[in-house]
Amino acid sequence: MSTKKLHRGLSVAVVVLASMASLSAFAGPVTGTAAEVLAIADTQVEALKAGFSSDRRLNTQRDGEKIYQAICQGCHMPQGQGAAEVGFYPALAGNEKLAAAAYPVGVVMNGLHGMPGFAHRLDDAQVAEVVNYVRSNFGNQFTDTVTAEDVKLFRK
């Protein structure tokens, strides 16, 4: 696991281990082989490094796939399969909760259980892009799309 420094001198290892500890307090102990746990941690490290910038928003990202890769796949995995065996990282692939477009919008904006909300990091268009990406990939075929105007209603 990397010991490089992140934003404001935080060690990558410390951030990932704290994240895993807080999630295990909610969902139970992190289990799996050391290699499995470290693989998940390394994926989270890459997502964390991609997500930190001097600006609190993800600047110019307008592509749902790129936003997913930068902030979501560290926990939900590259193919949206989740990682329940080493914590509570639910699968997005084939997830029926995504059928109602408002559900993933609310989760991305406000967080859920151990997942942080991203309302402060993503603008309305970015939230719509990542929600539409998740709802139309990983075996999901929800065709009704979310717009920035839809997302704006969640900020009120």
Image: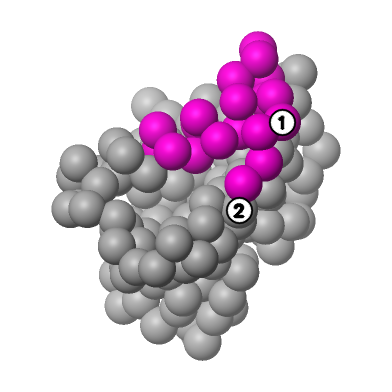
**Real-space Cα distance between discs 2 and 1?**
12 Å
Q: Is residue 52 left or right of residue 134?
A: right
Among all residues in the image, which is located at the extreme top?
8
Asked whether residue 16 is drawn in magenta, I would say yes
Based on the displayed image, in which of its 4 quarters is residue 79 positioned?
A: bottom right
Q: Is residue 69 left or right of residue 107?
A: right
Q: Which residues are magenta?
A: 1-19
Local crowd size for mark 1, using a 10 Å CA cut-off: few (<14), some (14–19), many (≥20): few
Mark number, residue 101: none
| Residue holding disc 2 | 42
Based on the displayed image, in which of its 4 quarters is residue 72 positioned?
A: bottom right
For this rendering, which residue is in front, 148 or 57?
A: 57
Among all residues in the image, which is located at the extreme front?
34
Asked whether residue 122 is drawn in magenta, I would say no
Local crowd size for mark 2, using a 10 Å CA cut-off: few (<14), some (14–19), many (≥20): some
Is residue 60 visible in the rendered image? The answer is yes
For this rendering, which residue is in front, 6 or 125?
A: 6
Say if mark 2 contacts mark 1, CB within 8 Å. no
Which amino acid lies under the numbered mark 2 shown in the image of this protein? Asp
| Residue holding disc 1 | 4
Q: Please identify the quadrant where the C terminus is shown.
A: top left
Q: Position of residue 124 (x, y in %)?
A: 58, 39
Where 147 sits versus 23, above or below? Answer: below
SS for dot 1: loop
Q: Residue drawn 29% across and 37% down?
A: 22
* Label located before the other in sequence (2 or 1): 1
Is residue 153 visible in the rendered image? The answer is no
Q: Position of residue 110 (x, y in %)?
A: 36, 37
Where 9 sits versus 39, above or below? Answer: above
Q: Position of residue 59 (x, y in %)?
A: 77, 32
